[in-house]
Amino acid sequence: MRVKKKSDNQKPCSGLRKFRQIDAALDRVFKAKNQAALIRAWDRFWVLSGNDRDDDIYENVDSLVRALLYRKSRTVLCVGNGLAYEAHALAHAGFTVDVLDISPEATHGLRERIPDPVRLQRVLRGESARPGGTLAIHTGDFRDASLCTGPFDSIVCRNMLQYLSVEDRPGALAALQQRLSPTGLLVLQGHNAPSFQGPTCTWLNEHGFAVCINMVVRDGRFHAPTPSASALTKQTGWVIRSSG
């Protein structure tokens, strides 16, 4: 009979423990009563998951680049970017990119990161690097109107609305809107459909946005997705602000 050594189960237990710690950090994000508690929760999340996080999760960065080029966009604000490679990839593609994140841990990590050109090209999925791109990283709450005032040609906000209560989302959307150019593109992504339903969609429609859910970008234009291109666990909202 084989006697199990302690090391046999060490890795799975460690992984499960870390997953629970990350889950607990996100639970603190939901329950944060003030900004200080929110910052602590997000810092804890990035300390736990930052080094192991898959930075290439944003599978439609190439579509975003094509849409921005088609719309002759130049400036991009990435809100709540965390440690994702997307901001670096957009700068690599030639855009003027600003990052605004509430977590000092995330912004510090992003500043320290040395971009790998091979990985950047993998995130861009064949889109060419272009000269002139820049990246500026700012720490702060995007609901603070004094930060990154814009206007920006495009704002990218991935997986942020889902961490806000339904009641708080209109105020968050208003904070994004005031930074967006009159004909700008607002890109929202969430892990669940309700992020784009109900009051959120109503607010966007009432404030002059054309909402396109899970659209595929070809030649810079938005098209209905094929069944194979439709994600079951994610929705991406390409939200175009109409002129005026």
Image: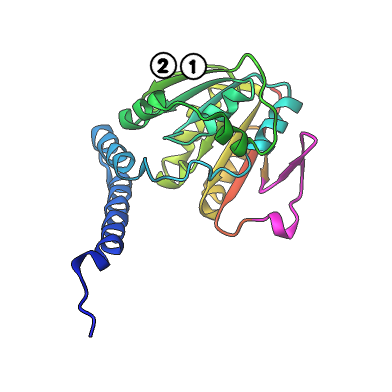
* Image: 76 above or below 51: above
Q: Is residue 89 at all visible to an observer of this figure?
A: yes
Q: Quadrant of residue 108?
A: top left
Asked whether, in this view, residue 49 is left or right of residue 170, the answer is left
Question: Which residue is found at the position 62% from the left and 56% from the top?
Answer: 231
**Residue farthest to the top?**
132
219 relative to 167, above or below: above
Q: Residue at x 59, y 50 (%)?
A: 235
Q: In the image, residue 78 lies at what x, y percent?
A: 51, 29
On whether residue 229 falls in the magenta region, the answer is: yes
- Indicate whether 25 appears above or below 105: below
**Cα–Cα span, label 1 and label 2:** 6 Å
- Residue 137 vs residue 199, the one in the foreground: 137
The residue beneath circle 2 is 146
Quadrant of residue 105 in the image? top left
- Where does the N terminus fall, quadrant-wise? bottom left
Q: Quadrant of the C terminus?
A: top right
Identify the magenta region.
213-230
Name the residue tied to disc 1. 149
Percent x, y of residue 44: 27, 41
Give the class, few, some or many, for how many residues have Cα within 10 Å of label 2's Cα (few <14, many ≥20). few
User: How many C-alpha atoms fall within 10 Å of the one at disc 1: few (<14), some, or many (≥20)?
Assistant: some
Report which quarter residue 223 is drawn in: top right
Which amino acid type is marked by label 2?
A: Ser
Magenta stretch contains residue 240:
no
The answer to whether residue 209 is visible is no
Q: Are marks 1 and 2 in contact (CB under 8 Å)?
A: yes
Residue 88 placement, left or right of 44: right
Amino acid of disc 1: Thr
Q: Position of residue 82 (x, y in %)?
A: 42, 35
**Residue drawn at 19 percent across, 67 percent down:** 6
